[in-house]
Every structure is written in C-alpha cells, then in structure tokens.
Image (tube, rainbow, N blue to C red):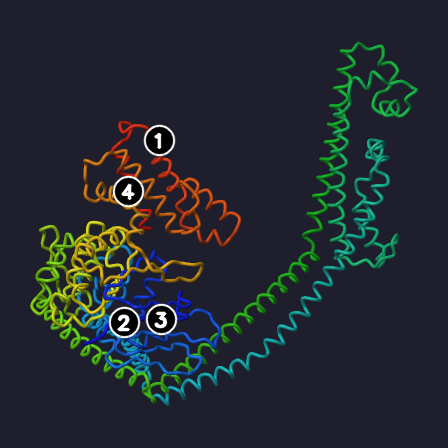
Amino acid sequence: MKKMFQKIKIKNISRFKEIELKDLRQNIIIFGNNGSGKTTFSNIFYYLRNEKYIEFFPLIKHNEKENCYILMEGNKQFKILINSADSQNLFIPENITDNFIVFNRDFVNENIYIGKEIRQENQIGLYEFIVGKEQVGLKQEIENLVKEEKELKEEIDKLKKELEEKEIDIRKLTLQKENISDLQNKAKALEENLNNLKYLEDIRKLDILKTTDINQKLEKVIDSVEGILNTSISTISKKANELKRKYFEEVKNIDRNWFEKGLNIIKENNLKFCPLCKKEIKEDDFIDILVKGISSEYEFLLKEISKLKKEINSFSLSELWSIDKINTDLYHKWEKYIKDLPKIYSLSPENLEKLLEDLKTDLIRALDEKLEKISEKLELYKDKYMNSDIFSTIEKYNSSVEEINNRISQYKKEIEEKNKEKEKLEKELQETLYKIKLLENKEIINLYKEKNKELKDKEKERKEKQRELEEKTQEIMNEYLGIINECLKNFNTDFSIENVKPEKVRGKGKRGENKIEYGIKLEHIDKNLDANTAFSYSLSEGDKTTLAFAFFISKFLKNSENCKDWIVVIDDPISSLDFHRIKSTVNYIVKYVMKQVKQCFILTHNELFFEKLYETLKDSKIEENWQFFEIKKIGELSDFNSLDPIKKLEENKNYLKALRILREYYYEKNPSINRTEIVNSIRIALEFYIKKKYYPDFENLNGVGQILYKAKELANNEVTYKKRYRFILDKFDELEDLNKYSSPSHHPSDLQLDDNEIYRKVEKFFEIIES
C-alpha cells in the first residue's frame, strides 16, 4: 500500500525562499490569490512526472553555497537537488511519480486540443477537438509534420523551377565548348575593335585645341568691344548733364555721315593702327566692334531720350509761375524753351497753360523725329556691313566649329556603345561558364531528388500518425464519451460531444490530407465540424477548462478501484466567472476524488468555491482528514500559513454575500432580488476585491474612493507603485464610475434605479474583476 506525503519542504524555488508543510493529512485545501504561488506548487508535482523539466524550474537568486531542493517524504524520502552546493545527485525513487495525477493549466493544454491553436487566448474557434495527452501529442506531431511538408514542397518547387530555367538555358548551347570558344573569340574581336578606336582619343584632343583657339579669338573680340563700350559709356556719363541741356543745339550740328567718313579715311590711307588709340586695326574686328558699338550707343541714346521725355512731361504750371531771376537754375532751364520769358507773367492762366502744353507737345515730337532718323541710319549701316564678306567668313568658321563638335559627340557615343557591348558579352560568357559547371556537378539535381524523398517520408509518417490518432481517439471516446457527457451535463454546459466516428467520417481539408470530423451538440442543435465549416460557436477558456476537467474526472469514474493509491493535485478547476459550475464541480471533487484517493491537494483563489468546498466537506463528515493552508505574498516572496476556514469565511462574509447576490442576478437572472441590494453589493464586492488584490496596502482605508485616490497619489510619486497599481490606473475611470454609482447617496430610494442601468453596471463589475 502506498503512503501519502507527510512532509513537503521547498527551498529557494521560485517564490518560495524556504517553506515546510508538516504532518500532512489526506485532504489539503490551499487558498491563495492569483500570483501568490499556487501554480508553482502544483507544477512541482506535475513536473515530477517528467524530470527533464526540473532543471528549468525558476530559482531564487541566492548564495551559491545554498541548495535549491524539493524534499518530499512518504513511504520513501526523496530529495530533488536542482542546484546543489554539495554536489548530490537528483534522486527520485522508482515509480514514485506514477501515482501523481495533476489537474492544472498544463493538463488542460496537454489534454484538450481545440482547433489549430492550443494556447490561443479568449475565444478559441472550435473546429475539432482531441481528448487525452497521448492523442494531443499525436495531433501536435501531425501538425508539425504538415508544416514540415509544406516547407519541403516550397523548397522542391523552388528547385524544380531553378532546374527548368537552367535546362532551357543549357539547351540553347549546341556544343558547350564551342559556344564558350565562340564567346571568347567574340570578346577578343571586340577588344581589338576597341583598340582600333583609340585614334578617337587623339581626335578628341585635337578638337579641344581647336575649341581653345576659337575661344581665344572670341574672348579677344569681346575684350575689345568691352573696352570701347566702357570708354564710350564713361565719356557719355561725364557729359550726361551737358548733353541733356544742349541736346537740341548739338543734335542739329551732327554730321550725318560720320560713320561712313571714318571708314573711308581708314581705307584711303590704308591705316593699320587707330590714329587715336594706336591699336591695331583688323577689318573683321573693326566692323564687328563698330556695329556692336553703334548698338550700344543707340541703346544708351534711347535711355537718355526716355529720361528727357519724362522731364518734359513733368513740366508743371506751378513751376512756371514761380520763375524769377533770383532762382538762376530754374530761370535758365525755362529760358532754353521759351523766348521772352519775363512776358509770361502778362498771360492769363488759361493762355499760360495752353502755352505749356503746346511746348511739351512740340518738344516730344521733335525728339521722336530725331530718333526715327537715327534708327534709319543705324539700320542702313547694319545692312551694309552685316552682309559683307567678313561676316560670311565668320559664319563659315562658326559652322566648321559646330561640325567638329558634332563629330566629337558621335565618337563618344560610339565608344560608349562598344563598351556596353563588351560588358554584355563578358557577362554572357561568365553565365555560360557557370551553367556548364552547374550541369557538370549536378548538385542541384541531387538536392532535388533528396528533398523529394524526404517529402515522401514525411507524408508516410504523417499518414501513419493520422491513422494512429484516429484509432486512439475512437478508442478513448468509446471508453469515456458517455462519462464525459454526463459530467458536462452536471457542470451546466450548453454543449456535449456527439457523433465521434473518425474512422468513418472523413473529408478533404485545405491541405488535401484526410481529417477527423467531430460532432458537437449545442443547445439541441447538431453540428458536424471540419476545418472548412463556418461555425459561429466558440469555446471560451472556461468551457475549455470544463471540458478538460470532465475528462479528468472521467478517469476516476472509470478507475474507481485503481485510484485509491493516487496522489491528486487540483489547481483552480473552474475559471473566475464560472459561478454556475461551482456546486457541481465541488460535488464531483468530494465524491469521486477526495473520498477515494490516497491524498488530495486542492488549490483555489475563488472564495465562493472555497466556501462551497468547506460546507460540502463538513457535511460529508471527513473533518479529521482535512487540512487548510493559505499562501500569502510577502513582498516578492510567498509563504504558507495554517488557515482557519471558519475565520476565513467570517472575514469574507459580506463579500461572499455580495458576490452571491450579483451572481444570482447576472448569471441566474433572478428577478426577485431587491435593486438597492444589488447596487450595494457592487460597492461591497468591489472594495473587498481591490483590498484582497493589493493586500495589505489598503487595509486601513474605507471605501473604494479612498483606495483609488491613494493608489493614484502613490503611483505619481514613485515608479514602483506605478507598476504595482497598473490595474487601478488603467481602470481608474471605470472603477470610479462604479464606486459613485453604488454609493448610497447616488440612489436614496429603490424607485430611482433603472433596471437596464443596473444590469450594465453589474456586467461592468464582472468584466473588471475577470480582467
């Protein structure tokens, strides 16, 4: 007969610095809030079933001289040294772990496969499910094989495509060696052609010299023009005012043939140098300079005439009236334009104004006539000399320069094209050599064959495992289906397992392999599901846990004779909000587990579950065989303490009552509950929940409002608190809203409460505590 554990000692493991549970009885109930260390404790038993996990256990940072160990004493004492200072070996007595039966989150994930994902949070699409650890393992192996097959097919397709491309390229080569030789000869001939084009470089240099000569000539002409223009402009600038004052007198004295006379003097006297500036006179330069000089002088003259017109238009009657001999400048200005200036004072204002307008008109007309005659003369000179042989020579010279430049551009383009042709041929040669080398070693062909063989092996292995899975699934369903459905019915689920015949019901999945189909009965509606079926129902995490627990319990119902030597650990068998399953879950645990097995550890964070378990155990009269502990966080560590269940329930009395009221109202739709009582229950349950979550931070505060603002104040002043109270800070507005709504001052009478609003607030309460 196997003995149960009398003592458990844990040192430096996870949150446990050093704990010791002595004189253990048959049934041990452990209460602990989430995050206190319940999961670590249950995992110790779970991982003992597979000792390879032990080395991955989280260790507390400690002195290396200290041991980290788990000591468990039963019929034999054994000590697991995870990090040993005295170099003792890991010792687990043979067969000791065969009797460990553990229900926790790992059991759920290892024994219930739903859809394509095992650890998907929130809603999990129910396409197919598999029950049993061995079957889940097989299904996971099949999924891995399918994934590997897909990857292999992708590799093979890639290799196949590459082979086809290489084959097409290689077919183009009639004889490999001859083709290489042809390409090499082609490249050599091209190189020779490029060498023959070297003379283009010399031409390019010659063109540069010619271009330089042209530039020098042009620069010299420009310098001469600029010199003459600068001198002319300078002279004109100095005499600008004089020209303006004496324009009319001077302009009638101008010899209209001055330009022609100047040319005749040069030709008749065969002058080689200018008689004024002593510079050499060249006919082509001279003509060009004179024409450009005339143009420049003409432009300057236009500007001066424009200024003069503006001055004439600015003549005003007021200025004319103000003339006297004292203002000499003003008097002289008008004296040029009006004879007998003093007599203007004898004229009437109207006559004087007419005199002024006539004067302005006459002056501007005279300017325009002179300007027109000058323009005609200028055009005459341009026509005469621009068509001369000198300018024809210049045009020819310019044309030859342009032709040379065009030749240079053409040669450059030819060189560029030849270089591109050479690069293309060189690249073609290299690719051809690579293709031939690839064909010779046949590496890609061998790899292709190897991958194809690997794929066939994987497909064969997958099909074998698929058959094995179908057989084992059918076997376990034949054995457990009725019991599991009975448990699901008692757990108040709205689904059951139906029509499980995987060896007969097959269909083609997306990947082409055979799939097992399962039927699920939901609220009297039958559904056959496969991977291609659109199905609106999803199993929540609570449903998944319940399905796993039903399978867990079915093992005890099927093995009632063998389970008397089992040591069982159950960690949180229901999720936080599965209130409607508490009673049936407790009844199954007490009747089929605690009363039958050698030893049972129950761990929970749910106060209502704890209350119901205590009441059921008390009614079953097994008080002498029970033991209660509580895991509490102390800073970053946790410790075990003995727990008085009666005192615990008394402390939680108001909270449990409030939680029951809210549960009955929200989940059981009880319409007879007083509305004011429901709202008060929100406030009571919310305050207890927050104090419990952050024990002992807010023990001395009364009311949710004080707790919220104290947490906010601490978080604003210290980063540590900001992290610790993240839940409060994230949900601050929602918590404050629930607190204000549930305050007595908010609803002095039952008549002021709205049923729809009450329902929304209770729903929000459960959302918050579940999150």
- Image quadrant of residue 514? bottom left
As shown in the figure, which amino acid type bears the numbered disc 3? Lys
Label 4 sits on residue: 658
How packed mark 3 is, by other alpha carbons closer than 10 Å (few <14, some 14-19, many 20 or more), is: some
How packed mark 1 is, by other alpha carbons closer than 10 Å (few <14, some 14-19, many 20 or more), is: few
Label 1 sits on residue: 746
Dot 3 or dot 4, earlier in sequence: 3
Instruction: Tell whether label 1 touches label 3 (CB within 8 Å).
Output: no
Query: Between tags 2 and 4, which lies in front?
Result: 2
Viewer-proximal residue, 532 or 144?
A: 144
**Is residue 117 in view?**
no
Cα separation, mark 3 vs mark 4, equals 38 Å
Residue 9: numbered disc: 3
As shown in the figure, which amino acid type bears the numbered disc 2? Phe
Cα separation, mark 1 vs mark 2, equals 55 Å
Cα separation, mark 1 vs mark 4, equals 18 Å
Cα separation, mark 2 vs mark 4, equals 38 Å
Cα separation, mark 2 vs mark 3, equals 11 Å
